[in-house]
């Protein structure tokens, strides 16, 4: 007897055939991988001695259109900051367009990190008394908050207007009612957003809650039975681990006690509470990475940490550890890009590598502006594979 169920099953199987669903997007991502800043190009940037020269060099790469239409009032450093942010946002939106429908929610959740970044940047700029033009070039419009919405936040004339401009965005509304912000009474959130200069502890709690919200939402969109779900979740957890390890180091360096340190950590990483507590109780900053077993999983990561420890003991600069942790995370992203086949893991891995490219260019730019020698800036760059 003719069975309609067999036809339906065959059609369903066809629509769930992963090479058919992810083949195009994954091929595009692997092609885009070749356009990332190379070791040689990074070395070329390091040899340049001005922001104007850096801008000119980038226009000869894949950043040309990102420099067009920028305000003539911007200085060269602001032009480069804005252009690389534009380039990243443009790439992120391209990734979103080519991502299969079933995985778009996961990628949108990842892009929520830039919504959190933008709100934090605006609040911190306001706290420091910065004008709109001093903050605008630091924003990255890669998330759900539109340029028009960001402009309203930056142009807010009053504390109440700033609060409302954040609350009425999709991201802001969801954040305020989220589990991550549940420990802050709504009035406290409103007060922190409205008057970020009034209460240091409250604004710090709000900034931490924004980070926690991102990790909470991003992790919740990854389906446990989805192909490469473990790869994606491990990337998110590793990112949280990096943030927590570096937070502990900075606060420990500032003589903060265990209670204060634990209050400033995000949730969602691989480190257990007892591990984080041991890090917070460490006698010296250099002990902390030793209490992070399993993070430096590769020989390259272990070697980078050993070198960071050696240099830290020589000059007391935490940036050596920052580069070691960030490099280890970048290698994980590259591993995800290579290991994932026909899944969102390939796209997520590339997104994190693209962000590292933006960070590297900004490090060169800011290092040059501060007059740092080429060798010192080179030590801060994270370029993998």
Image (tube, grey):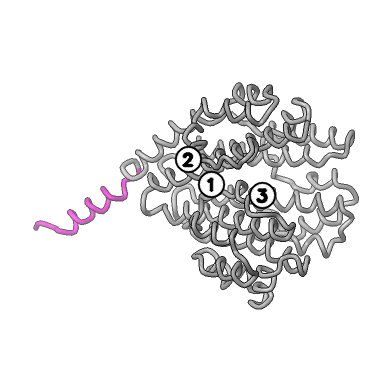
Q: Do residues under tags 2 and 1 come within 8 Å of each other at their CB atoms? A: yes
Which of the pair 101/381 is nearer the observer?
A: 381
52 with respect to 370 (left or right): left
Counting residues from the N terminus, which is met first, the one under dot 3 or under dot 2? 3
Q: Quadrant of residue 301?
A: top right
Task: Tell me what residue is drawn at x 64 percent, y 41 percent.
Answer: 329
> As displayed, is residue 132 above or below residue 73?
below
Calculate the distance from the C-alpha at mark 2 to the C-alpha at mark 1. 8 Å
Q: Which residue in the structure is indicated by mark 2?
A: 340
Q: Which residue in the structure is indicated by mark 3?
A: 134
Task: Tell me what residue is drawn at x 63 percent, y 54 percent.
Answer: 132
Q: Give coordinates of residue 40: x percent, y percent.
A: 61, 21
Q: In this view of the protein, can residue 215 be seen by the observer?
A: no
Calculate the distance from the C-alpha at mark 3 to the C-alpha at mark 1. 38 Å
Part of the protein shown in magenta: 1-18
Q: Give coordinates of residue 291: x percent, y percent.
A: 79, 48
Q: Main secondary structure of the magenta part?
A: helix
Which of the pair 86/212 is nearer the observer?
A: 86
């Amino acid at each position: 007897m003719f069975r309609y169920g067999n036809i339906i099953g065959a059609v369903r199987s066809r629509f769930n055939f992963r090479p058919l669903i992810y083949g195009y997007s994954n091929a595009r991502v692997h092609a885009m991988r070749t356009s990332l800043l190379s070791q040689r190009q990074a070395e070329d940037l390091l040899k340049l001695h001005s922001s104007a020269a850096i801008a000119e060099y980038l226009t000869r790469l894949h950043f040309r259109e990102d420099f067009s239409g920028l305000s003539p009032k911007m200085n060269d450093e602001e032009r480069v900051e804005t252009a690389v942010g534009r380039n990243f946002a443009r790439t992120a939106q391209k990734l979103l367009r080519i991502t299969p429908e079933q995985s778009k929610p996961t990628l949108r959740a990842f892009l929520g990190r830039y919504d959190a970044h933008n709100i934090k940047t605006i609040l911190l700029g306001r706290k420091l008394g910065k004008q709109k033009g001093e903050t605008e070039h630091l924003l990255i419009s890669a998330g759900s908050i539109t340029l028009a919405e960001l402009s309203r936040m930056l142009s807010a004339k009053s504390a109440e207007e700033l609060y409302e401009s954040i609350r009425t965005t999709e991201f802001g509304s969801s954040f305020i009612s989220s589990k991550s912000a549940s420990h802050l009474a709504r009035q406290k959130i409103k007060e922190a957003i409205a008057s970020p200069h009034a209460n240091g502890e409250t604004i710090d709690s709000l900034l931490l809650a924004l980070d926690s919200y991102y990790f909470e939402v991003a992790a919740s969109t990854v389906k446990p039975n989805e192909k490469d779900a473990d790869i994606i979740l491990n990337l998110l957890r590793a990112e949280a681990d990096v943030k927590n390890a570096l937070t502990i180091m900075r606060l420990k360096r500032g003589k903060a006690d265990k209670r204060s340190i634990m209050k400033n950590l995000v949730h969602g990483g691989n480190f257990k509470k007892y591990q984080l507590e041991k890090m917070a109780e460490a006698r010296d900053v250099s002990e902390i990475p030793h209490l992070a077993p399993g993070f430096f999983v590769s020989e390259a990561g272990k070697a980078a940490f050993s070198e960071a420890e050696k240099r830290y003991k020589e000059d007391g600069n935490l940036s050596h550890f920052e580069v070691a942790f960030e490099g280890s995370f970048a290698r994980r992203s590259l591993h995800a890009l290579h290991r994932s086949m026909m899944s969102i893991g390939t796209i997520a891995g590339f997104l994190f590598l693209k962000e590292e490219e933006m960070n590297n260019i900004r490090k060169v730019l800011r290092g040059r502006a501060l007059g740092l020698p080429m060798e010192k800036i080179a030590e801060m760059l994270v370029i993998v594979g």
